[in-house]
Structure formats: C-alpha cells, structure tokens
Image (tube, helix red, strand yellow):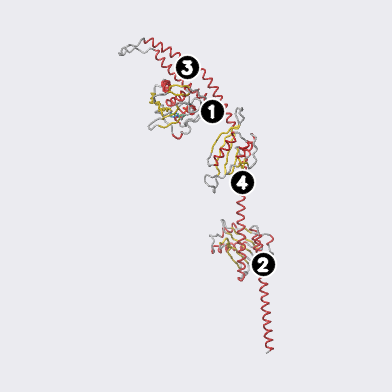
Amino acid sequence: MESSVQSESRTTERAHRSSNGQHVDRLSAIRHEMEYINTIGKRFVAAFDRFQVHRALLAALQEIYNFSACCILLKGDPFELFIIPSYPLSTAFLEGMIQRIANAANVIDFPHVDAEQLARTAYLDAPDELARPRGEKEIAGTEIGSCLNIPLTVENRIIGLLSLFDERPGSFDTNLLQLTTMIADYAAVALENVRLRERETALWRQAEFERQRLELILRSMAEGLLITDARGTVTSLNQSARLLFSQVGIDFKLPTPLYQLAETNNAPWVSRLVEIIGQAQRSKTVTNQEVMIGIDDETVPLTLSISAAPLHDANSIPNRPIGVVAVINDVTSNKQIERLKDEFVSVVSHELRTPLTAIKGYTQHLVRRIERRLRKLRGPQPESNQPAEAAPEPPESYDLRSLNIIQSQTEHLERLVNDLLDLSQVQWGHLDLHYESFYLADELADSVRSVQASTEQHTITLEVQARDTKILADRARIAQVVGNILDNAVKYSPHGGLIKVCLEQHDEEFQINVIDEGIGVSPEYYDHIFERFYRVHNTAIRQYSGIGLGLYVAKAIVDRHGGRIWFTNNQNIGTTFSFTLPGRPRTGPLAKA
Ligand code: ADP
C-alpha cells in the first residue's frame, strides 16, 4: 500500500516535473517570440523613410523564411512597386513575380493593376547590405517555386500588397502565417506613416517656397506695402515702405500700433493714414487717397497715394477683417510734372488773354460805330404803325452780322482761356470768388444773347419761373458756367434745334436747366464727365472740338458756391444739364449779410 502510494507520488512528481518542464519551455518560447516582436516593432518605429521600412521588413522576414525576393505594391496614382531581392535575380524570375503580383492585386480590393505598367514603374531596391550570398543548394532558376501574398492593411483599409517569392517550392510555412500577417501590419503602419510624413514635408516645403517667393515679391516691389493686424498694429513693412517713411524721419520698429505713431507724431498726414487704415479695418476698400507729407514752403511736397483693403481669411467673420493691407505710392514726381504742366498752361493762357482782350475791345468799338452809322442811314423810325417801305439793306448791316459772330466767337475763346487759367486754381483748391449782388435772370439773358449770336442753326430761349432773381454770387464765374454749358449745348447739337434755358426757384436756391436736342451722353460716362480733360470716347466725338475742361471748371465753380451740378438724358433726344445756386452763400461772413 505504502509502496503503491510512494510509486503513485513518484509518478505524480514525474508528471509534475514533466508538465513543469513543458510550461518552462512554453514560457521561454513566448518570451523569445515577444522579444522577436519587440525588436521588429522597434525597427519599424525607428524607420524614417520607406527604404528603412523595407530593410526592417526584410530583416524580420528573413528570420522566419528563406526567400528570393520580397515585393511591396502600394496603392496610389500611380501604383508604386518595390522589389527587394535577397540576391541577384534573372529577368524571367522578375517578370514572373510582377505578373503574379498583378494577378494577386486584381483578386483583392485593388483598382485594376496592369502587369506591363507595373514592370515599367517597378523600383528595384537592392541595397548592398541586403545582398546575401546564395547558398550552394539554392537553385539559380527562372521559375518561381513558391509565393506568399499578404494584403497590407491600416485600420481595415488595404493600402498595398506584400508578396514573397522563392525559387524552391514549399518555402512558406503556413504555421507562420499569423506571425507574417503581424509583421505585414507593422510594415503597413510604418509605410503609411512615412507616406504621411512625406506628404507633410512636401506641403511644408511648398508653403515655405511660397513664403519665400512672396517675401521676394514684396521686397522687390517699387510700391510701399504696410500690413496691420485686426487691431491696427503694423506687423509688416516692405523695403520701399520703410524708405518712404524714413524720408519723413519715421523709423518703424515692428510691431508698432498705429495709434502709438499718432500719439507721438501729430502731423496731419499721420492722422490721415490712421483714418485710411481705420476705414479698411471697418471692411471698406479705400483707393488712391493722396496724402501730402511736406514742409509747407516746399513747391511740391512729398505726396503719397495710399490704397488700403481689408484682409479676410476663410474663417474670419464678415465685416471683421483679420488685418489691413495698404499700398503706398510716391506720386511726388507725377505731382511735379502736373505742376509744371499747369504752370505752362497758365503762362500760355495769360499770353493769349492779352491779344484776346484787344480783339474783344476793338470789335466792340467797331460794332458800336457800325450800329451808329446804321441808325443814321435808316433815319428816324416812322411813328405810325404802318410798315415802312422795304429799303435795300445797306452793306453795313452785313458787316455788323460778321462782327457779331467775331464778338461771340471771341467770347467763346475767352471762356476757353479762362477755363485753362482756372485749371491750376481749381486743382490746388485756390479758386477765389468775388461776390456781388445781381439779377440772375439778366445774367442768363446776356449769356443767351451772346451764344445765340454765334449760331443761326439753333434757337436759344430763356424761361424764367422765378419772381425775384436777385442773387449774391460771383457774376463773372456764373457767366462762365452758363457759357460753358451753353457752348456745349450748341456744339453737341450738330443738327441745330431748340436750346431751352429755364430758371426756377426752389425755396432758397435757384435751379438752372439747359435742355438741348443734341447727341446725348451715355449714362456709363456719368461718373467721369465732370473730370479734368475728360471727353467721351466715341468715334463721333472726334468731330467736335474741345479740351474736356468746361464741365470740370463749371463743377468747381458751382461747388464753391455751395450748389450741385448734374445731367440727365432727355426721354426723346438730347441732354439736360442742371445746376443749383443758393440765393446767398450758406457759410462765411456773407452768409447772414
Ligand atoms: P469739351 O466739350 O471741351 O470736350 P467739357 O468738359 O465741356 O469738355 O465736356 C466734357 C464732355 O462731356 C464732352 O467731351 C462731351 O462728350 C460731353 N458733353 C458735354 N456737354 C454735352 C451735351 N450737351 N451733349 C452731349 N455731350 C456733352
């Protein structure tokens, strides 16, 4: 009994020892497997580019299989195929592999793969350190003996295919399939990481390239560029802007809030700059605002033309720009040229005025003499209402008509010269007015008479719809405005017709309308017609003489009087030019007089 117990306990002990031994073996196998997996994992994690991933993959696989080549096919446009041979392979073997890879890819979830196309783009990744001398028993064949295909997946998404090929049959043990799939998964994740990193690097490189290009453009721009953030702090200035500001003693240290600049510098141009930027901060685009930065006694001060626009990005709230970009141009030399041109025009106009005054004076003298002679020739007028017998017209009456035309044309020429003389005054805001009290209706009648004398084709009428037309204004200037508008009405009505001048009174202001039956003005020119030297550009206009100053000066005079000027196209034909004039100045010392 005892012995049986003893022998039983010995048997149990043996059994226990043997099961313990198995257990130890299993444990050491697991430890070994885990160490292996750990080493592989580390290699994949350390791999920085796709070739390092290939090496890590090859090293891991070579520990469990003997094979001739390992291939990686990656999805993409185009596909990428990497062939990593264990030793040099024959062309037939390579072709066979590519054909089999194409077949395998077409079986799994892959867009169609063409073997010929793969062959053209295949990349042979055979680094020296991978080359393994072929074992003596290894067959140098052209045939593929065995093959193993495993999809490369990341988060259940197939990103490629891993294929192993060997010249000998049965090289790939199916028991190791699970381990091989795990290695393939590691490789897939590592390859995807490399792909993401490459894409990120490419994007960074592209962004950096764009940044450098932009910087180069900004640096080489002749225009000054100033960029602020949403709060109006200057964050960036290009070289030209720095140069412009340094001319007026401002050395920007970035970032500088604009309000700080305004606090330390009370020059009017600084507050103007702050105002322009402020408008852009409120989402308004401002263009070509002239800002003079000059010492007062300079003939032409440093003049900048500033345009500013709000900066919006895709995420910014509407009307809340993320900053402002301002372009600054030095237009001083343009101003200099303009000033010279104006001076030239002014000198020439002065020179023209002297002979004109003489012509006008002598014509007037002749007109009066001929009128006197005609009165003498005709004798006293019969008192009765009976019509006198028609006497032949004396030659003096023809002379008088001719002289009237000379007189009217001289007045037209005088208006042109006056417009030219006024140009620089208007331009630099020095248009002076000499107020006097007169009857507007009388002045209009004089202008109508004068212009009527220059044309037989047109009939000019005056209609006064006002009781008291007494006005306090610059008489000569108002005559200039009416004369310019009437000259145009005649000039741009080439087929003659009726020209009506209407004087209306609305409360404290007068409105003068000049209605013609001429060629009309297309509404698209509305914004420009009152600009300096502006003439409507259509071919027809070429037949009309003019210099594009009449309306510019007329507008300046009307504006200075505190009135408005505009035009409308008549429904049937022609144009109506209108302007208003207050009965007396609205501001200044004469306003209450
Ligand atoms: P100018 O007559 O010397 O060209 P203005 O400043 O007087 O210059 O007029 C500017 C332009 O306005 C003219 O060139 C013409 O095209 C247009 N314009 C002015 N008045 C009339 C009008 N009554 N009818 C048609 N077009 C006119």
Mark 2: amino acid: Tyr
- In primary-sequence order, the first of circles 1 and 3 is 3
- What x and y, as percent, mark residue 471? 44, 24
Element type at marker 4? helix
- CB contact under 8 Å: marks 1 and 2: no
Image: 271 above or below 48: above
The mark found on residue 211 in the picture is 4
- What x and y, as percent, mark residue 295? 62, 30
The residue tagged 2 is: 36
Real-space CA distance between mark 1 and mark 4, rounded to the nearest whole angstrom:
45 Å
The residue tagged 1 is: 429
Real-space CA distance between mark 3 and mark 2, rounded to the nearest whole angstrom:
116 Å
- What x and y, as percent, mark residue 136? 69, 68
Q: Indicate if the residue with disc 4 has its beta carbon within 8 Å of ligand 1.
A: no
The residue tagged 3 is: 360
Mark 4: amino acid: Arg
The quarter holding residue 513 reads: top left
